[in-house]
Amino acid sequence: MTIDDLVLPDGREVPGCIGGDALYAALAARMWEPTTEMVAPVGRDFPPSILAEMSAAGLSDRGLPRRDLPTLHNRVAYCDNGDRTWTLFSSDADFDALSPIPEDIPEAYRAAEAFLVLAMTLPAQERLVAHLKATTRALVALDPQEDYIAGNEAALRRLIAKVDLFMPSAEEVRRLLGHEDWAVAAATFAALGPETVVIKLGAEGCLVHHRGKTFHEPATPAAVRDTTGAGDCFCGAFAASLVSNGFDLTRAARHGTQGASLAITDYGVANMLRTAVAMNRGG
């Protein structure tokens, strides 16, 4: 969970916006599985107004443990061409401390059919994956963090071997394998252990590899304003659709691209929140 100060292309500033990969993914997931919840620590300064917005969207605060730290804080400046400049006000140590640990998972959530471990520090992901594989029978999906890949390739391969569903971006594939042959990359990751590999390809959609078979799903057309959170929304929608529709990979891929398309039509998480609130109210 993050607090993001946005600077729009026309210079207008929109401070104090809610953000973070857990929220993007959870909001997208709830479109196909309304019981989806999130686990994401927040800082001591997390605004009550944002908790109210999340509640209106149907999300519980049971999975939002407080840490005695400031909430992760970023400044995101947008350019006319869609580029973004990020300024991070939190340290790597803060990032790790505000990543979830196994003890943060509410007891009521432990019977879930699937857990999606999103981008956070590598040690935090390792702890969560080991715990979930040892204590649940759920599908465990992993979305890596591109910034930690360099120097940790062997550790990440060991982590990939433990999960059921691996969901890297094109950039993460490049950093980990050094090429752009997506079908070969998916097969390489599958050989490590995951039954299913999904490579997110941005405007080109995604490539899905399952038990030796591969298919491509094109992106859902949308007017692009801000691509922040698109990959997280894809992961959340894909995983939720997968467990709610009898593990139909084709439908899950289509729903994943639809979830991503909703994220990119407005700055920040605004459109996802509006959609979630309307759905929660029956609109």
Image (spheres, rainbow, N blue to C red):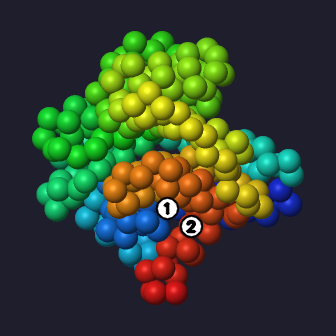
Q: Which residue is mark 2?
A: 272
Do callouts 2 and 1 mark residues in contact (Cβ within 8 Å)? yes
Asked whether residue 194 is in view, the answer is: yes
- Identified by mark 1, the residue type is Ala
- Identified by mark 2, the residue type is Met
Task: Name the residue rendered at 45%, 48% in the picture.
Answer: 249
Left or right: residue 192 versus residue 184 is left
Q: Which residue is mark 1?
A: 28
Residue placed most toward the observer, 161 or 210: 210
Tell me which numbered mark, 2 or 1, is placed earlier along the sequence: 1
Q: Crowding near pointer 1: few (<14 within 10 Å), some, many (20+)?
A: many
In the image, residue 109 sits, relative to residue 179, either above or below, namely below
Across and down, in percent, residue 62 comes to 25, 64
Across and down, in percent, residue 271 comes to 62, 69
Quick one: SS at disc 2? helix
Across and down, in percent, residue 67 comes to 31, 51
Residue placed most toward the observer, 278 or 17: 278
Task: Name the residue rendered at 36%, 46% in the picture.
Answer: 116
Asked whether residue 44 is in view, the answer is: no
Task: Name the residue rendered at 48%, 12% in the picture.
Answer: 151
